Amino acid sequence: KYDYVIFIDNSCKLSEDECDELLDGISDIVSMVFDYPDSRVGVVQFGDNKGSVEILIDLNDDLQNQDSSEYIGYLTQNAKCGDGGSGKTDLVHALKTQSEYLDYGDKVIKYIIVSACKDESGRVCEYGHNHLLERGVEAHIINL
């Protein structure tokens, strides 16, 4: 059993076309890993500050029981990636927020982080090493 959490960066000032392409790519990822009840897929949006973290689809959401096309339809209608921001990402707060909700039982937890920004703070690497690896969370980072 797997829990996937997809993190979408909404701080990169993407154009509408760039955002649509990003969401199409994320939809492709969801279609590959969505396999309820053997896997669940959550989606977290984040921006450039602590207050911008939003859990768009929780791992326990009723959408988990739907087929992948309904899930993807909800995702593409509600996800945001072109709202602006300063181009400075705050992934660390998104990771901290999501880790509070995870069930670390017998599931393999995988994070898929999608961003077009560069985190220059260095906190992501430090946090990833010290927090995610200790908890057995596997992280895949897609930086465009």
Image: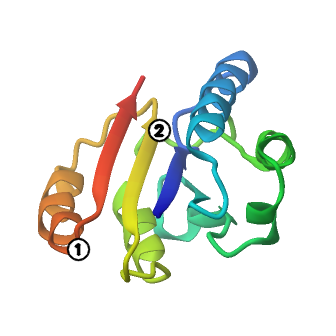
Q: How many marks?
A: 2
The residue where tag 2 is placed is 114
The crowding category of the residue bearing disc 2, from other C-alpha atoms within 10 Å (few below 14, some 14 to 19, many at least 20), is many
Q: Earlier in the sequence, mark 2 or mark 1?
A: 2
Task: Locate the C terminus by quadrant.
Answer: top left
Q: Residue at x 50, y 57 (%)?
A: 5
Q: Residue at x 34, y 62 (%)?
A: 92
Dividing the picture into quadrants, the one containing residue 135 is bottom left
Q: With respect to residue 7, does 108 lie above or below? A: below
Of 5 and 97, which appears nearest the observer? Answer: 5
Q: Position of residue 76 (x, y in %)?
A: 79, 39
User: What residue type is disc 1 on?
Assistant: Arg
113 left or right of 72 in image: left
Q: What kind of colouring is applied to the model shown?
A: rainbow
Dividing the picture into quadrants, the one containing residue 56 is bottom right
Q: Are marks 2 and 1 in contact (CB under 8 Å)?
A: no
Q: Residue at x 83, y 40 (%)?
A: 69
In three-dimensional space, the C-alpha distance between marks 2 and 1, rounded to whole angstroms, equals 21 Å
| Disc 2, SS | strand
The residue where tag 1 is placed is 135
45 left or right of 95 in image: right
Between disc 2 and disc 1, the foreground one is 1
